[in-house]
């Protein structure tokens, strides 16, 4: 019925408008294609579009359609509140669209709703802009409302960024880290009930999952996983009694396992159990250090000077230096040529005529410029122009000459050549150093080796600049050879230690492939404790292998083998 009344009203208005036009303009022919009838049809379509948008509750579209209409045609749109004659229809539509967008912004203010709020805020900003452009009154306190929602959107954007980071940690398996990220967010937004429910649900889900891991670890009799889970649960809820009880059970189980492994001759397994307890906060550091020292096998050989004075330790290699290093110097005279050769004897310097002529001309120009300046100041206007042109010409020439003088040398030279007799100070020396050593392996077998270093000293060296080799130069070369021999000895010790670690790692991997994981652990862990500090790459590989075989964290292996950054 409302739609029929709207159409009847529209037809009546069209007839009324056409009748008024005919009355105002006598002799007018109402043709269907006339400009006035087309304008009336366009206005009716806009009025109808605005009315339909109001009936369908599309307040923004209705406001935009009404702003297109002229002022005297807006009153024909179906009003929202017919009883409110004191307020115009467009003001009612503006307020309704303004309140509708504010309500939608309030509904969108929830976790992960910042993008929707940004889209709605752009539409809310458009309403006062179009009102100002159309010349109608803007909504009340629109600047204050926009400022309020701008602050809320910025706060929601930062909140959503933290939520996305927490979700990323949660999907990667770091549930505890995700909860730690969300806790400060609740302090920033204490009144956000939806965020509180969101974080509470995530926290409860993580707690239930950790509790399930604790129950599963107890069923499998795995105290390591139970202790790790209780630590996570303690980070989330420190007052949880179940986590404390499970932690006490896991610690006691680890102590019992360590004692059992010690009694069965598996000290490396007991060392790992103690490392887990130490990482959990148990005061067993002194006992762990003593056990580590007892099972350590140093891989770097000891360098001994002279002869052996006692028995060799089991599993220890030695490098024996029975004697001292021998350094010899040999000279070789170069064959002298019978024919003299031409060589540079010096340089003869002379003054440059071109530079001298430029300096003379430059001084002359400076005098002329000073004279023209003194004549130019008291001259008449006509004479001043002529004197200024002459002065400018000389200034340009003086500037050109000064630039050329800056880059051209004042003197020139030529080389003087003369015959030179062959020099007798061309003796070159070869410094040869040897150091005999005996490498004694862990089985007590000795392997004789010799470390050799050779250094050539000649007058043609760059740091001598053609000077002859003197006794002091030979002494410096001899000391350099001795230092190089000591360095070679250290390199030999490092190579032996690396080779022993590589052999132990390969043998342990063979045992692991054969299924003997405890044997592989007992073989590799003592070698890893006594490895050289220069073999960090092999130490990292060995630690990863042990962590994989024993199903423990890599940090636990590093604590047991002194590779951890923390004490």
Image (cartoon, grey):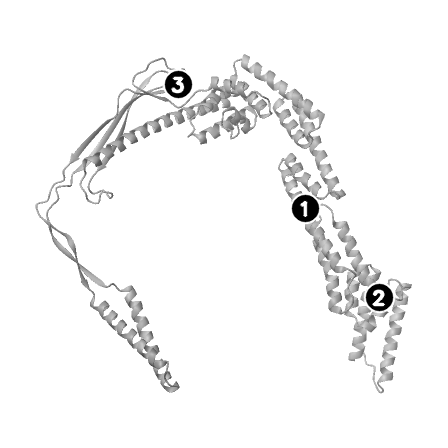
Is residue 44 shown left or right of residue 465? right
Please name the residue that numbered disc 3 is placed on.
316
In the rendered view, tell whether residue 268 sits above or below residue 4.
above
Q: CA distance from mark 1 to mark 2?
A: 40 Å
Q: Which residue occupies 19% across, 64% down?
A: 351
Using a 10 Å C-alpha cutoff, classify the residue at mark 2 as few (fewer than 14 neighbours), some (14 to 19) or many (20 or more). Answer: many
Residue 231 at what x, y percent from top left? 64, 28
| Quarter assignment of residue 214 | top right
Image quadrant containing the N terminus: bottom right
Using a 10 Å C-alpha cutoff, classify the residue at mark 3 as few (fewer than 14 neighbours), some (14 to 19) or many (20 or more). Answer: some
Residue 500 at what x, y percent from top left? 40, 24
Please name the residue that numbered disc 1 is placed on.
160
Viewer-nearest residue: 152 or 100: 152
SS for callout 3: loop
Please name the residue that numbered disc 2 is placed on.
89
Which sits earlier in the primary sequence, circle 1 or circle 3? 1
Q: CA distance from mark 3 to mark 2?
A: 100 Å
Q: How many marks?
A: 3
In the rendered view, tell whether residue 551 sits above or below residue 75.
above
């Amino acid at each position: 019925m409302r739609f029929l009344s709207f159409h009847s009203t529209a037809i009546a208005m069209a007839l009324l408008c056409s009748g008024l036009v005919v009355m105002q303009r006598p002799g007018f022919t109402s043709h269907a294609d006339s400009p006035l009838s087309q304008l009336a049809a366009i206005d009716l379509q806009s009025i109808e579009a605005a009315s339909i948008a109001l009936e369908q509750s599309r307040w923004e579209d209705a406001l935009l359609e009404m702003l297109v209409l002229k002022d005297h045609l807006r009153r024909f749109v179906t009003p929202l509140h017919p009883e409110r004659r004191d307020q115009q229809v467009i003001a009612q539509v503006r307020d309704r669209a303004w309140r509708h967008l504010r309500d939608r912004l309030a509904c969108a203010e929830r976790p992960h709703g910042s993008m929707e709020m940004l889209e709605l805020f752009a539409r809310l900003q458009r309403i006062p802009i179009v009102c100002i452009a159309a010349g109608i009154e803007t909504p009340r306190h629109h600047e204050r409302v926009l400022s309020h929602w701008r602050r809320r959107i910025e706060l929601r954007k930062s909140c959503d960024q933290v939520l996305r980071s927490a979700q990323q940690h949660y999907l990667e398996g770091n549930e505890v880290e995700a909860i730690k990220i969300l806790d400060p967010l609740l302090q920033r937004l204490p009144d956000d009930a939806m965020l509180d429910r969101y974080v509470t649900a995530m926290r409860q889900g993580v707690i239930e999952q950790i509790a399930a891991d604790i129950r599963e670890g107890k069923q499998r009799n795995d105290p390591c996983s139970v202790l790790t889970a209780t630590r996570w649960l303690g980070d989330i809820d420190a007052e949880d009694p179940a986590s404390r009880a499970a932690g006490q059970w896991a610690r006691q189980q680890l102590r019992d396992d360590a004692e059992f492994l010690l009694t069965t001759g598996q000290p490396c397994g007991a060392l790992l159990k103690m490392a887990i307890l130490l990482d959990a906060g148990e005061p067993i550091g002194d006992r762990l250090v003593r056990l580590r020292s007892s099972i350590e096998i140093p891989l770097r050989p000891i360098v001994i000077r002279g002869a052996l004075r006692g028995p060799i330790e089991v599993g220890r290699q030695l490098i024996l230096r029975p004697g001292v290093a021998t350094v010899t110097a040999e000279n070789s005279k170069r064959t002298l040529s019978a024919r003299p050769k031409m060589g540079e004897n010096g340089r003869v310097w002379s003054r440059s005529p071109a530079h001298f002529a430029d300096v003379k001309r430059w001084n002359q120009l400076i005098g002329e410029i000073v004279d023209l300046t003194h004549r130019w100041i008291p001259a008449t206007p006509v004479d001043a122009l002529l004197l200024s042109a002459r002065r400018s010409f000389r200034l340009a020439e003086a500037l050109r000459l000064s630039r050329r003088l800056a880059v051209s040398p004042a003197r020139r030279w030529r080389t003087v050549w003369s015959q030179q007799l062959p020099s007798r100070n061309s003796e070159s020396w070869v410094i040869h150093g040897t150091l005999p050593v005996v490498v004694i392996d862990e089985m007590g077998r000795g392997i004789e080796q010799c470390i050799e270093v050779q250094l050539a000293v000649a007058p043609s060296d760059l740091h001598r600049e053609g000077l002859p080799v003197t006794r002091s130069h030979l002494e410096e070369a001899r000391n350099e050879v001795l230092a190089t021999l000591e360095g070679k000895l250290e390199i030999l010790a490092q190579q032996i230690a690396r080779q022993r670690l590589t052999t132990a790692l390969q043998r342990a991997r063979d045992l692991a492939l054969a299924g003997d994981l405890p044997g592989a652990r007992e073989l590799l862990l003592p070698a890893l404790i006594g490895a050289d500090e220069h073999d960090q790459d092999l130490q990292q590989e060995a630690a990863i292998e042990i962590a994989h075989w024993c199903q423990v964290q890599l940090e636990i292996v590093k604590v047991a083998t002194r590779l951890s950054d923390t004490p």
